Image (spheres, rainbow, N blue to C red):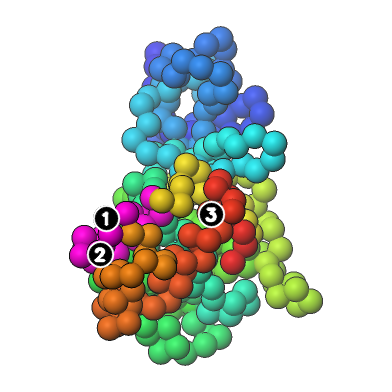
Amino acid sequence: MELTGKVIRSTRSQYVVYQEGKRYTCSVRGKIAGAPDGEGFSIKVGDDVRIRKISDQEGVIERVLPRKSKLSRAVGGRFYREHIIATNIDQMVIIMSVKKPAFKSGLLDRYLVIAEKNGLSGVICINKTDLAEENQFSEYADWYPRLGYPVYFTSAIEEVGLDHFRKALKDKVSVLVGHSGVGKSSLVQKIEPSLNLKISEISEKRKKGKHTTSFVELFPLSFGGYIIDTPGVRELGLWDVYRDELKSYFTDFVNQAGQCQFKDCSHINEPGCAVKAAVSSGEIFSQRYRSYCQMYHDLKTMPYELNPL
């Protein structure tokens, strides 16, 4: 008897598959049905699979169902290669903190580029509002929703904004991204205490989070949906993003770009650039444009991986 389930955790040789409230520890025997031809294919967290039960707690993965999306990053080293972090994701929930670690708008925009590249909806959560006033981030709350990116303010300590955060996750497969220490685990534990995730601590010396997650794992939510918690990433490479196409992932540039003097305008140094004019007139958020310029120049010298912002 075959069942359809979702891979929620993977190790070197075994996978945990979630199916209607039950978990099965599964192995793979032989070639995986449904896997694309070529070397290097592996089952990822988020994959929908068909399994054959061999006991009440064990099974064998027989088939991988088609993926509707994936989140990838570049892996540095001698060869440029893709590393698939997770699959079948609906949205990327970007967790930023107001302090400890400090808010970095360039990092926020980098994550949004990754979301756009992977065809994922972007959701912004600005956490730890108990450490700073929300009005310090009013520009972000004003600009980003205009671009289709909802912005939520939360505090796990003061339990502020948790209902809105919960609604944003309901019935979605969400990947949570953000530097270590921004409060991903704290937020999740507040809305789903049974998960009992490890909470990262802030190093007083470095003011950066300590890594508490060393592997990707997907967690079912009792109110519907799944979340994928990812290890804290200080350097996130952009897979298959090139300098000349970067502008297409800045959705606020698209309408203006058609009015540039040159069709192939990079929006950096060319005369008659409508995007730069829109920045000067306040039609485009100036911080977004600064983020774009930083990414553009990083990609120019390092086409597959961005330098830390």
| Badge number at residue 300 | 3
Secondary structure beneath dot 2 equals loop
75 shown above or below 290: above
Would residue 193 be seen by someone viewing this image from the given angle? no
Q: Which residues are magenta?
A: 245-264
Under mark 2, the amino acid is Cys
Residue 181 appears at what percent x and percent y? 63, 67
Q: Magenta stretch containing residue 83, yes or no?
A: no
Name the residue: 37% across, 39% down: 69
Left or right of 149 on screen, residue 244: right
- Asked if the magenta segment contains residue 247, the reply would be yes
Nearest the viewer among 239 and 19 is: 239
User: In the drawing, what numbered circle is on residue 260?
Assistant: 2
Q: Is residue 73 left or right of residue 35?
A: right
Could you tell me if the residues under marks 1 and 2 are in contact, i.e. CB atoms within 8 Å?
A: yes
Splitting the image into 4 quarters, where does residue 250 fall?
A: bottom left
Q: Secondary structure at mark 1?
A: loop
The amino acid type of the residue labelled 1 equals: Lys
